[in-house]
Image (spheres, rainbow, N blue to C red):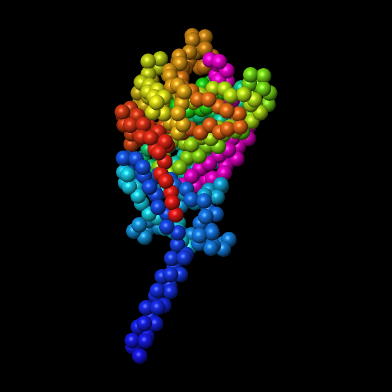
Amino acid sequence: MKKIFFLLAVALMAFASCADSKQAMTVTVTNPLALERTGEMVEVPMSDVVAKLQLADTAQIIVLDADGQQVPYQVTYDEKVIFPATVKANGTATYTIQPGTPEPFNVIACGKYYPERLDDVAWENDLVGFRAYGPALQARNERGFGYDIFTKYNTTEPVLESMYAEELNKEKRAKIAELKKTDPKAAAELGRAISYHIDHGYGMDCYAVGPTLGGGTAALMAGDTIIYPYCYRTQEILDNGPLRFTVKLEFNPLVVRGDSNVVETRVISLDAGSYLNKAVISYTNLKEAMPVVTGLVLREPDGAVVADAANGYITYVDPTTDRKGGNGKIFVGAAFPAQVKDAKTVLFSETEKKERGGADGHVLAVSEYEPGSEYTYYWGSAWDKAAIKTADVWNKYMAEYAQKLRAPLSVAY
């Protein structure tokens, strides 16, 4: 009798194991490069997960690593399950997706629309922060054409919302206005205390954009003339964490080479653990191919620049708004998954320098845009007060990032 019970128990365990295997999806991630890939986001279509696991609409899933530990994940606006993978050089790693109740995950990549600050859209992850300027700023004739950068250190948590709250605090702003009449020194001290242009121990805005391409904006070119985009017209936040922030920006119509009503659309996403955003650019109603550039504004005519067309990246060491060095240096860069035609430094004439708010020029990567296509590239920054301390380390990061773009992780299941 005991033997019968034992055999029955074994059979039930085998049945349960078989049932469990039908409710699990093994994902194998392969790294073709001789570089370790750490925390790099991989994507699996949610439709494949649902089909494989035979999930009901309300079912929850979990993602497990090879040790059976839960891995944070997100289902994106375009119905992909994304999670960070770590794969050794020329190696593979396996992950499992199965039904289950996920542990709570910290929100790492997130952002917000700020109508109270002239329609800024600002976003961040654990390493960096950025913003794009909106229609209210353009209505005031302020010329902020490119992306702005927020530096970040001493924290991996979101800080931009609290920075904006202090910067825009109505009561404190009213107090500053009062103090200016009676105690200008106290007014200045309070202004510094709430300003995000001052480092309060977790980062700041010390990057100058002005009427330039700023920290990595793309623009069409007619001959040698950049057709500068202005502030976005509409914004839509598509993903808001925990691992990816995505925003869709649409711009006002342009006249380009006689083509009227040319409308630029950008889809920008920032993943946890990355210094770089992904940008997907398209132009509707453009009739013929023309050059498109990605630019980094130069604040020194002889600044430290790398313009490497063959290996697909450009970088610059920005002196920040404090030329005395108190705010350190900001490393900016862009990387390209497809071959670019050229990468170079272009300095402004004295006349254009005045038109561009005193900037000295751009480092540009030049590609060709075909009507009806998408132009994809990656742009971002780091700060020498945080983890990346030198230009050499930043250039190595950018060179390896470009390699990874051109040899992506492969995902099989």
Residue at position x 67%, y 22% in the image? 259
Quadrant of the rendered image containing residue 24? bottom left
How many dots with numbers? 0
Residue 222 lies in magenta, yes or no?
Answer: yes
Image position, residue 64 (x, y; %): 40, 57
- Residue 170 visible? The answer is no
Residue at position x 55%, y 27% in the image? 369
- Residue 256 visible? The answer is yes
Residue at position x 33%, y 36% in the image? 387
Q: Is residue 177 above or below residue 61?
A: above
Residue at position x 43%, y 19% in the image? 344
- Magenta-drawn stretch, dominant element (helix, strand or loop): strand
Q: Answer with left or right where residue 16 lies relative to residue 50.
A: left
Quadrant of the rendered image containing residue 36? top left
Q: Quadrant of the C terminus?
A: bottom left
Q: Nearer the viewer, residue 93 or 228?
A: 93
Q: Answer with left or right where residue 282 lies relative to residue 87.
A: right
Q: Answer with left or right where residue 270 lies relative to residue 154.
A: right
Residue 328 lies in magenta, yes or no?
Answer: no
Q: Nearer the viewer, residue 38 or 206?
A: 38
- Judged from this view, the residue extending furthest toward the top is 350
Q: Is residue 212 above or below residue 70?
A: above
Image position, residue 61 (x, y; %): 48, 59
- Judged from this view, the residue extending furthest toward the right is 260
Q: Quadrant of the N terminus?
A: bottom left
Image position, residue 158 (x, y; %): 45, 43
The span picked out in magenta is 221-249
Q: Answer with left or right where residue 74 lies relative to residue 262.
A: left
Image position, residue 147 (x, y; %): 50, 29
Q: Nearer the viewer, residue 209 or 271?
A: 271
Q: Nearer the viewer, residue 325 or 104?
A: 104
